[in-house]
Amino acid sequence: MTTMQTTLPTADDIRDRVRVALQAIGADVPLGEPGQPGLQASTPITGDVLFTVAENTAEEADAAIAAAAEAFTAWRTTPAPVRGALVARLGELLIEHKADLATLVTVEAGKITSEALGEVQEMIDICQFAVGLSRQLYGKTIASERPGHRLMETWHPLGVVGVITAFNFPVAVWAWNTAVALVCGDTVVWKPSELTPLTAVACQALIERAAHDVGAPGTVSRLIQGGREIGETLVDDPRVALVSATGSVRMGRQVGPRVAARFGKALLELGGNNAAIVTPSADLDLAVRGIVFSAAGTAGQRCTTLRRVIAHRSVVDTVVERVVTAYRSLPVGDPSAEGTLVGPLIHERSYRDMVGALEQAEADGGEVIGGEHCAIGGELGAGAYYVRPAVVRMPAQTAVVHDETFAPIVYVLTYDDLDEAIALNNAVPQGLSSAIFTTDVREAERFMAADGSDCGIANVNIGTSGAEIGGAFGGEKQTGGGRESGSDSWKAYMRRATNTVNYSSELPLAQGVQFG
Ligand code: NAD
């Protein structure tokens, strides 16, 4: 099998694909020539700038927030199942335009076609979840200690939700937030990654069309484009009740305290440093497949990417040998070409970070296998960065292993007993995803117990990536503590009121207090 392509599409080919997809979606936005003022929409496939997309000013961001705040005054009292009709229509449009949107995801984020289609499927899934939710926004009734009293909780919309998203899930994370926020009665202002403005334009066209089709105000979901400064308008504006921010820990450190300073709510989905423990009883066929998909998929650019394998001394050599063998046959190249499994890194900085991390790991006594640059379509510096995924055997969990390097590097550590493995799993500052490969039910249960993995996701016999809609997604510690996309995560998008109703003709006080 050939594992490296030697040709890439031309920038003009890619521009044509973008035009066709945007036209099919009905996103009628002016696209400028590269180099004009505005956001430079580029592709990691070739490294070329494709178009210029208009960047919003602070005044325009302010106007978008004002429009969403105004729309909220009517949307909050629209019955939730009626709000659900808008999300249902969005879901239908996503089904219709699944391939078009996936094309744009591949162009801007460099995902292979299957993963790009999977990302759009996740949007469809969250729409369906949210439509069901629109008839299930339950509050509790609680037994009152006072006769003739009813005690209950009601849930109400929050207001404007500011959504800030990362480049690596350019459309799904918007949908996770927007579908749920809209059925909860909130309105949305979205600031996508500056690296993915074209997918954002396409999503905005679809939500506006859905709103038009069901007679909802188009201003319930707004888009503002730009970099960090435009994101900061959402962070600092008191009209934005909740800031849902997805990205690096560095970004979360800036956003979290600023939102807290104005007593706003923040939902943070930040970086991960995910590990899989491979025990002596593990089904190694399964473990190796799980490791390869989680560590090399999306070229190591998922928040849930497997970054550490913690293997028992009795199996570690076999695991490394089999993963390295699998890596050698992974086709690296154009993500839009059939058969490719590993696409490009997003940009040069990611590549430099990967090289730096591998050098540091080697200096720390690590043995690096793979990780070479693949000079597809030109030498380094041509603007596209394709790499072979790397396996690094480490003598210890040094500082470089504690960092999230957003590239396909998996560090392999060795353990002797399960307590040690769990301690290694938990020793990093992030707490997103984790897994154990075992056929021993005691080990599996221990891993998921209170003294087991400290992560928001703890899997058994599957890898760390590829979560499905339905379960709450998110992580602990520096990952930020947010939960999205399933279970009762909708509660983050609403406010709770506790109501005590006295239907008696007496006025008994709680705790038996007598007053006059
Ligand atoms: P990034 O932090 O560079 O940028 C994310 C977004 O935040 C962008 O839209 C950016 O413009 C904005 N931003 C940055 N600083 C800001 C500030 N001070 N105020 C307001 N907005 C600001 O992240 P990235 O490189 O696009 O994405 C990769 C990172 O995202 C990785 O760390 C990855 O683990 C993480 N991620 C986490 C999840 C999750 O659910 N936990 C999902 C996807 C990605």
Image (cartoon, rainbow, N blue to C red):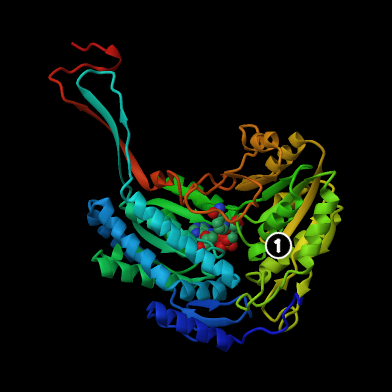
Residue 188 in the image: x percent, y percent? 36, 59
The quarter of the image holding the C terminus is top left
The quarter of the image holding the N terminus is bottom right
Residue type at numbered disc 1? Pro
Quick one: label 1, few (<14), some, or many (20+) residues within 10 Å? Answer: many
Depth check, front residue: 60 or 31: 31
Q: Which residue is mark 1?
A: 408
Q: Quadrant of residue 429?
A: top right
Relative to 476, does residue 122 appear above or below in the rendering? below
Image side of residue 117 versus residue 394, left or right: left
The residue drawn where x is 58% and y is 56% is 466
Residue 78 in the image: x percent, y percent? 23, 54
Relative to 113, does residue 184 appear above or below in the rendering? above
The residue drawn where x is 66% and y is 74% is 339
The residue drawn where x is 78% and y is 46% is 311
Quadrant assignment for ligand 1: bottom right
Residue 39 in the image: x percent, y percent? 50, 75
Image side of residue 117 versus residue 449, left or right: left
Q: Quadrant of residue 82?
A: bottom left
Query: Does the rendering let one see residue 119?
Result: yes
Q: Quadrant of residue 421?
A: top right
Which residue ends up furthest to the left in the rendered image? 505
Residue 297 in the image: x percent, y percent? 65, 63
Depth check, front residue: 141 or 10: 141
Q: Dot 1 lies on which element? A: loop
